[in-house]
Amino acid sequence: MSSNTKSALRFTRRRFLATAAAATGPLILPSGVLAQAGRPGANDRLVLGHIGAGGQGKVHLHFLTGRDDVNVAAICDVDENHRKQGIDFTGGKAKGYNDYRRVLDRSDIDAVIIAAPDHWHGLMAIHACEAGKDVYVEKPASKTVEEGRAMVEAAKRYKRVVQVGSQGRSTPAAYAACNYIHNGQIGDVSRVECWHYENPTGGDPTKNQEPPPTLDWDMWLGPAQWVPYNPDRAHINFRWFLDFGGGQIRDRGAHVLSVVSWCLDLDDRDPVRITATGEPPKSGMWNCPTEMKVVYEYENPDLTVVWEQPGTRPEFTGKDWGFGAVYKGSSDQLIVRAGDGRCETEEKAMNYTPPSSGYHAFKSPGHHQNWFDCIKSREKTNMDIEAGHHIAKLCILANISYRIERPIRWDGKNERILGDEQANHLLGSAGRGPWHLS
């Protein structure tokens, strides 16, 4: 038996419970409530639970408000103010919760949207799969490689439909770029150069204080290492800590690298070497590198993908959101700007029509709609958890290389760092208290 097979068996046998209160198996829904494969359900209106109502959670709620095909029946947030705002989005109809497990307990909830901070994505998604819920989980899919693999195995075991929130693949520009590149319009691509503005510097450690009475700080931290409450650490600022978010490489990198992987058919291919260097902050509490360069080296074919903050912005006309990628081929190049919901590319790609016998990328009806459609058809989404885990790995390994200050030789098949046991310890996390993979 190969080591990869043994690893897969270990994950298959693993129980993904954080506490005894978490669900222990798939929820059996009443027959006909949801569509069966190839057959519409008696009730086409999906009942959703929404976990995390601040930040990106508000974006989801804006989109869902007023839709006839979904009913947001539950709002969960550990911040009472965010929770109340989320309930207001539903016209006061949704019930509010502080603990996401209580949402998963509800037999009427078909699926959940997880927009909690990054360090919660893995456990929440795993528990949702165990409870028989389909899942939309924000990017990056996971905080650690171990979490991501557990998410993939949970989705398989419980036969759940999972969409990861790297929505670039659902944009017309990424669709056009994918067709243009796949059909050889720039030749063989040997290099992709991604650019992004720097991570911010800041965070005042003297602001450590008791959390406000409206915030359950212990629950906000969850599986992360305990630290005192600080307004410069909470909510949106979690992105600038390696233990919570991981900086631009894990935030926007999950968008840009997702489009790169789709356009170059890399979802099932891993780099063999990752080298990250960076400039640590000179002041403040935030510890993500201000400047950063990551080089991903692939074999068969020879390909180099570079992520650089700030990098070199190529010349182009039109909108500029401060990040994107340029694909360099043997006969031409193509610029793709941004890579999230604001993705744009050059007119030559937008105006290109693939030949009938050529490659035709999947044309998404929209990232949420693709998820809704797949919940009913039970097909894979266009950014399913396997692809989401693959992209998250790239971002995680970059930060590991930066932290250990040396290149990583990566065994993608077994998801191990070769010849570096110290670095391998960073592929997982011990969690905190009851919040851990078991």
Image: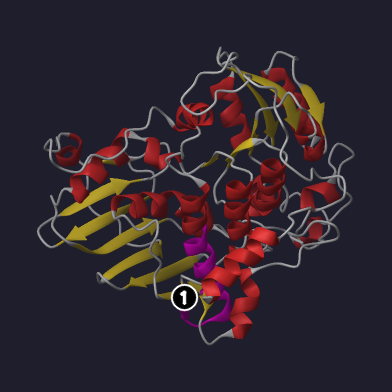
Q: Residue furthest bottom?
A: 419
Q: Is residue 342 left or right of residue 289?
A: left
Query: What is the x, y in percent for residue 44?
Result: 56, 16
Label 1 sits on a secondary structure element that is strand
In the rendered view, how is the structure colored?
A: secondary structure
Q: Is residue 254 left or right of residue 265?
A: right
Q: Is residue 190 left or right of residue 83?
A: left
Q: Residue 400: within the magenta?
A: yes
Quadrant occupied by the C terminus? bottom right
Q: Residue at x 36, y 35 (%)?
A: 171
Which amino acid, mark 1?
Asp
Residue that carries the numbered disc 1 in the rendered image:
411
Overall secondary structure of the magenta stretch?
helix
Q: Residue 327 sits in which quadrant?
A: bottom left
Q: Is residue 230 shown to the viewer in this render?
A: no
122 or 341, which is in the foreground? 122
Q: Is residue 14 shown to the viewer in this render?
A: yes
94 or 162, which is in the foreground? 162
141 or 219, which is in the foreground? 141
Q: Which residues are magenta?
A: 392-410
Q: Residue 370 sits in which quadrant?
A: top left
Query: What is the x, y in percent for residue 240?
Result: 61, 57
Query: What is the x, y in percent for residue 3?
Result: 54, 76
Above or below, comparing residue 408 to residue 369 in the picture:
below
Above or below, comparing residue 244 to residue 278 in the picture:
above
Query: What is the x, y in percent for residue 11?
Result: 64, 62
Quadrant occupied by the N terminus? bottom right
Q: Bin the neighbour count of mark 1 within 10 Å (Cα to Cα): few under 14, some 14-19, many 20 and up.
A: some
How many numbered marks have been drawn onto this rendered protein structure?
A: 1
Q: Residue 327: within the magenta?
A: no
Above or below, comparing residue 62 to residue 202 in the picture:
above
